[in-house]
């Protein structure tokens, strides 16, 4: 599956960028606009190491900072794949370790329309042509604006079933434009 994801994004001009699975609190949270005691941290309960301020990354988003610092001042088109860790109850739907792939594009004149086009192209190539995709407003501290992305259920074709909780839609990702605070922390001037 990762190979297929890599190929789809490669065709769209993205390259794979690897970043550490063990991060500092600063890289995993603070540089992504999630300061200590921010309520958004509740969404990312993590595993801390015995070394103060060092943890297993809760998302691949810290890779944004690594990539921006590696490529500055050049434009960026990367995907950030890898394992992520969250201290959660293990159920049939969730596990404490899972794989995530994040995309990052930084450059002049990139708009929300570009982001939507990339996501729609990905959904159609990954899950089959003709996919219906919808965007819902959401909140992530490191993106502005932020959206949740759903596609029509691949099992019931949007009619509603147990897998899609009878809505006809499956959430496939969160997304958004990089928050100006995060751009500055990565070395880019958002103006």
Image (cartoon, helix red, strand yellow):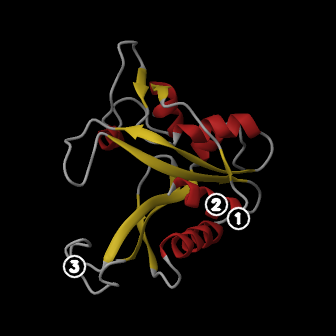
Q: Relative to 15, is 115 above or below?
A: below
Q: Residues within 10 Å of mark 3 (few under 14, many from 20)?
A: some
What is the spatial separation of the Cα atoms under label 2 and label 1, in whole angstroms?
Answer: 6 Å
Label 1 Cα neighbours within 10 Å, binned few <14 / some 14-19 / many ≥20: few
SS class, disc 2: helix
Q: Position of residue 57 (x, y in %)?
A: 44, 33
Residue 134 at x, y percent in the picture: 44, 76
The disc label shown at residue 7, or none: 2
Seen at 74% across and 54% down, the residue is 107
Confirm or deny contact between disc 2 and disc 1 (CB under 8 A): yes
Distance Cα–Cα, label 3 vs label 2: 31 Å
The residue closer to the viewer here, 131 or 65, is 131
In the displayed structure image, the side of residue 51 where residue 189 appears, left or right: right
* Nearer-N-terminus badge (3/2): 2
Residue 5 visible to the viewer = yes
What secondary structure is found at the residue carrying circle 1? helix
Residue at 28% over, 87% down: 159
Q: Residue furthest right?
A: 74
Name the residue carrying label 3: 161
């Amino acid at each position: 599956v990762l190979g297929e994801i890599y190929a789809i994004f490669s065709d769209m001009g993205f390259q794979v960028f690897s970043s550490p699975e063990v991060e500092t609190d600063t890289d995993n949270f603070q540089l992504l606009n999630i300061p200590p005691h921010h309520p958004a941290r509740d969404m990312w309960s993590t595993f801390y190491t015995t070394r103060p301020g060092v943890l297993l990354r809760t998302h691949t988003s810290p890779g944004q900072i690594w990539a921006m610092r590696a490529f500055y001042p050049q434009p960026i088109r990367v995907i950030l794949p890898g394992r992520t860790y969250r201290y959660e109850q293990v159920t049939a739907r969730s596990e404490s370790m899972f794989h995530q792939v994040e995309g990052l594009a930084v450059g002049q004149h990139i708009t929300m329309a570009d982001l939507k086009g990339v996501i729609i192209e990905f959904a159609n190539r990954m899950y089959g042509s003709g996919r219906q995709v919808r965007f819902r407003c959401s909140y992530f501290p490191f993106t502005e604006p932020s959206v949740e992305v759903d596609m029509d259920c691949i099992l019931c074709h949007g009619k509603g079933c147990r897998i899609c909780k009878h809505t006809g839609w499956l959430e496939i990702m969160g997304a958004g434009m990089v928050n100006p605070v995060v751009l500055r922390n990565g070395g880019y001037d958002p103006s």
